[in-house]
Amino acid sequence: MKRRDFLRGAAALSPIILGAADKAGTKLPVLGSGDHVYEAQHDWGDLPADIKYGNTHGVVEDSQGRIYVHHTVNAASESSDSMVVFDHKGKFIKSWGKEFKGGAHGLHIRKEGSTEFLYLCDTKRGLIVKATLNGEEVYSIGYPEQSEAYKPGPDGKRQKWSPTNLAIAPNGDLYVGDGYGSSYILVYNNKGEYKTTFGGKGKEAGKLDCPHGLIMDTRGHTPVLTVADRANNRIQRFTLAGEHIDFVSGTNLPCYFHYFKNGDCVVPDLGARVTLLDRENRVIEHLGDDSATNWKQTRTLTRDHFTPGKFVCPHGASFDHQGNIFVVEWVEVGRVTKLRKV
């Protein structure tokens, strides 16, 4: 039997154990089936002893194959650095970002000309920050006072503002989701200057409830803004002018998105699974599905309570250039998993 045929058959019994082993010498679980088979390497990366993960919220890869993990920092951590950078083999390179401790959330990377920049959302300070790969700030965006939706009410109180993530249009416009605030999407130009607002809390088409993650879908002829409308348990798509297009089914609590070059989309689902969609937004696989368990309790427990080959609370996910998937989870002790493409 050919190795590829064996893997396809074995994956149907997921999670399956193959010959590879983790740091403790135990065999690694394999998830998926067919052309989407992955070996799950939990607790990937050699984290320095003075850094202890808080909630691991965002993960991206740069053009050099380096992996960036953004976390809130554990109370027991000696270092307050919220950004940890590894090489593609998991060797620690550097860390930075003390100012994001407690608020590290959305993470996006974009190449502009010959230079790459990181875009970070801080839910604690209510900031969107554009930074270099070394953490040097280019600009920041704070409370959206220019938006009519955020003008003080008759009682003088301001709308809640806590941006969770963003997407960037081909022309450089930023689309920011106020996921933990008032559920609007705010648009800024590439200098961080305010343009417009749409959305707002509600269940009807065009309204949102916790627009937690966003991505610019450029797989077709016309760019489409895709939003993880998490508290409404759905994915919603918009034109760049903010007009509702449709809904995408197949996820329970979608958090974020990332596309691979073949058009596949990975969606970390907070409810204990990672979903893969094809370029037509049809479900390919639910990886590491543990949604039938009490994952809300498990996320507060120690690492020995996590089941190998199962996810607890996937919050961020990103393909690397080889098609492997990095998944970071909203668990109190942090968790970084590399799904190595088999």
Image: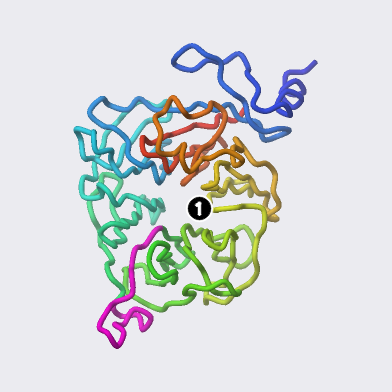
Q: Quadrant of the N terminus?
A: top right
**Residue 261, position as x, y percentages in the image:** 59, 46
Judge whether 80 appears above or below 47 on screen. below
Judge whether 202 appears above or below 86 on screen. below
Name, please, the residue furthest toward the right: 1
- Would you name the residue on which mark 1 appears? 255
* Structural crowding at the residue carrying mark 1, measured as other residues with C-alpha within 10 Å and reported as few (<14), some (14–19) or many (≥20): many
Name, please, the residue furthest toward the bottom: 154
Residue 262 in the figure: left or right of residue 136 = right
Residue 217 in the figure: left or right of residue 105 = right
User: Image point 34% across, 78% down: which residue?
Assistant: 150
163 in magenta: yes
**Residue 192, position as x, y percentages in the image:** 32, 69
- Nearer-the-camera pick, 199 or 300: 300
**Residue 55, position as x, y percentages in the image:** 36, 42
**Based on the displayed image, in which of its 4 quarters is residue 342 positioned?**
top right
User: Which secondary structure class fits the magenta region best?
Assistant: loop
**Based on the displayed image, in which of its 4 quarters is residue 86 positioned?**
top left
Span of residues in magenta: 145-164
**Residue 334, position as x, y percentages in the image:** 38, 36
Mark 1 residue type: Cys
User: Image point 63% across, 72% down: which residue?
Assistant: 245
Judge whether 128 appears above or below 57 on screen. below
Residue 283 in the figure: left or right of residue 331 = right
- Nearer-the-camera pick, 141 or 251: 251
55 in magenta: no
User: Image point 67% across, 41% down: which residue?
Assistant: 285
Judge whether 237 appears above or below 135 on screen. below
- Nearer-the-camera pick, 172 or 276: 276
Helix, strand or loop under label 1 = loop
Residue 111 in the figure: left or right of residue 325 = left
User: Image point 28% across, 40% down: which residue?
Assistant: 73
